[in-house]
Amino acid sequence: MSDLVLDTHALIWYLEKSSKLSHAAKVAIKATLAGGAVLYVSAVSLAEILYLDEKGRLPAGTLTKVLAEMNRSDSALAEAPFVAGMVEAMARIPRDVVPDLPDRMIAGTALHLGLPLVTADSQIRAASITTIW
């Protein structure tokens, strides 16, 4: 399996071992891990986690837990910094299909990297990028 990009909720559900993660997403993540490939986390997702944590929409300390997991020497999680090429990729994702800026940025990350995005977001899944759910 190749590398994957995880949407914010997919990352959280993966780390929590949540039943909210779809079967196809679990299989893809497991195959990625078994193949020694990388699970990319957009820097936008990290900012989104901070924002949701501050608003009380995530358990306190979620960002700290995510960063600790990413910083483990054996972690398969890697940050995908947001760069200008991702903005160019965002332009290929219609705003009327994916109107939320963080969602477009995360989708643009996957499109720029040429990787599938693991997401439950129906708007992103309707866009012209490869998704897994």
Image: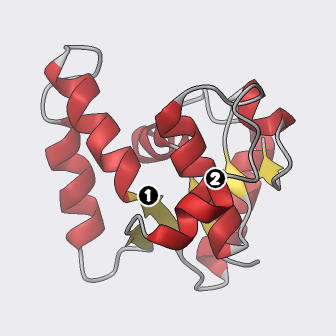
Quadrant in which the N terminus is drawn? bottom right
- Label 1 secondary element: strand
Q: Position of residue 114 (x, y in %)?
A: 73, 73
The one of 123 and 32 positioned closer to us in this rendering? 123
Left or right, residue 32 beside residue 93: left
Q: Position of residue 120 (x, y in %)?
A: 69, 32
1 or 2: tag closer to the N-terminus: 1
Left or right, residue 2 beside residue 58: right
Crowding at label 2, few (<14), some or many (≥20) Cα neighbours within 10 Å? Answer: many
Quadrant in which the C terminus is drawn? top right
Q: Which amino acid type corresponds to the residue marked 2 in the rendered image?
A: Met
How many numbered marks does the figure carry? 2
Q: Which amino acid type corresponds to the residue marked 1 in the rendered image?
A: Ser
The one of 56 and 21 positioned closer to us in this rendering? 56
Which corner quadrant of the image does residue 60 belong to? top left
In this view, 36 is above or below 85: below
Q: Position of residue 129 (x, y in %)?
A: 81, 53
Which corner quadrant of the image does residue 49 belong to? top left
The one of 43 and 83 positioned closer to us in this rendering? 83
Which residue is painted at 76% across and 38% down in the image?
Answer: 94
Which residue is painted at 28% across and 22% down in the image?
Answer: 58
* Number of the label disc, if any, that sits on residue 90: 2
Left or right, residue 34 beside residue 73: right
Left or right, residue 70 beside residue 10: left
In this view, 8 is above or below 84: above
Residue 111 is at least partly visible in this image: yes
In this view, 88 is above or below 131: below
Which residue is painted at 55% across and 64% down in the image?
Answer: 86
In this view, 107 is above or below 101: below
Q: Which residue is mark 1?
A: 42
